[in-house]
Image (cartoon, helix red, strand yellow):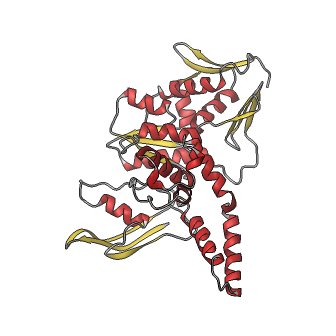
Amino acid sequence: MITVNNVSMNFSGQTLFKNVDLKFVPGNCYGIIGANGAGKSTFLRILSGDLEPTTGEVIIPKEERMSILKQDHFQYDAFTVLDTVMMGNQRLYDIMKEKDALYEKEDFTDEDGVKASELEAEFAEMGGWEAESDVSRLIQGLGLSNDILYSEMSSLTAKEKVKVLLAQALFGKPDIILLDVMLPTLDGWQVCREVRKKSSVPIIMITAKGDTFDKVLGLELGADDYIVKPFDTKEVIARIKAIARRVGNSPEESEVKEVRYDKLSVNMTRYELRVDGKVVDTPPKELELLFYLASNPNRVYTRDQLLDEVWGFEYYGDSRTIDVHIKRLREKLEGVSDKWSLKTVWGVGYKFESEEDE
């Protein structure tokens, strides 16, 4: 839980906001709404720790981590690409720098040795020894060369910097990404495409573009949901909760949820799709749709039935989103086996057609 206590902000004698007291409770989504110049970005900078408030404090528990996609392309010009991406997990980065500073001391004491061993243990527990290879895979997955790992950010182009900052946000391992279409340098469509090259983390696109073409484009690029501005925050919360429920695995669930066919395995316990023995990176919604159809072979479902069963009653979008997800699944499964297929039943809906007996 993030707690805001008596936060105020003044610029040159002008008060942007004052005496703000808030608690951000886990499981909820919060939106900040206001006119241009009202202080929305300033308040977010205070929350993220980029700016000190005039009064008050923001309390974030040590065990919780905040991931942020930065829009200041010059903020990290003095740092290497490796350091910049690792800052996506600020605690891990701070531990690395602290222990490096200890080892560089000429008068290394016994107390320093004890502190260093404690830091090493925490560093290892957080996956610090694999961090460099993780960063390398991230930037290569986003289309950047591994050769830039130790280059300074100032030597990169604007688009390369945005991709590095995107890698930084992904390095923080977010559970869900809320993505605005209107972004500088790389727009939301491009960011969505780049994320999908590396990660299957759920993406909800938020935009003022409400045309069917824009919605279909976002879904085809890999988004799991699409919300048009202006929107009610209750709708955003409902959609986030719906996705979180479907992606999260309950610790009480010991039963493996899996369906198997010739050269095909859909495992919902691990949220994993295997095609011809190879793991295929698949967004959660596509996986859930395929699992539901494959669990009920040769049965025809309408689009509305699939929306109810897979998306849930909290979904507010167009039923044609089913068409988009089926299209993307077919691209992954085309030509794999002649014993099963995703069939369109014209005028009705879809079915998973199989010749096998389960």
Q: Can you give x and y, in whole percent of width and height, for residue 206 in the image?
A: 40, 42
- Percent across and percent down for residue 310 are 57, 35
Looking at this view, name the residue that lies furthest to the top.
346
**Which of the two residues, 258 or 133, is positioned nearer the viewer here?**
133
Residue 69 shows up from this direction: no
Residue 243 spot, x, y in % from top left:
54, 44
Q: Quadrant of residue 108?
A: bottom right
Report the residue that reaches farthest toward the right. Answer: 357
240 or 329: nearer the viewer: 329
Q: Tell me: 25 left or right of 137.
A: left
Q: Is residue 69 left or right of residue 100?
A: left
| Residue visible at 68% across and 57% down in the picture | 130
> Can see residue 15?
yes
Check the image and report above or below for 347 versus 204. Answer: above
Question: Which quadrant does the C terminus fall into?
Answer: top right
> Residue drawn at (59%, 74%), measured in percent from left and top?
98
Number of callouts: 0
Q: Nearer the viewer, residue 137 or 150?
A: 150
Residue beneath the point at 48% across and 32% down: 219
Relative vertical location of residue 62 with respect to residue 168 in this rendering, above or below: below
Residue 224's place in the image compared with 298, above or below, is below
Q: Quadrant of residue 117?
A: bottom right
| Residue in the foreground of this view, choosing between 23 and 172 | 172
Left or right of 242, for residue 37: left
Position of residue 150 measured from the top left corner of the image (x, y, whole percent): 56, 55
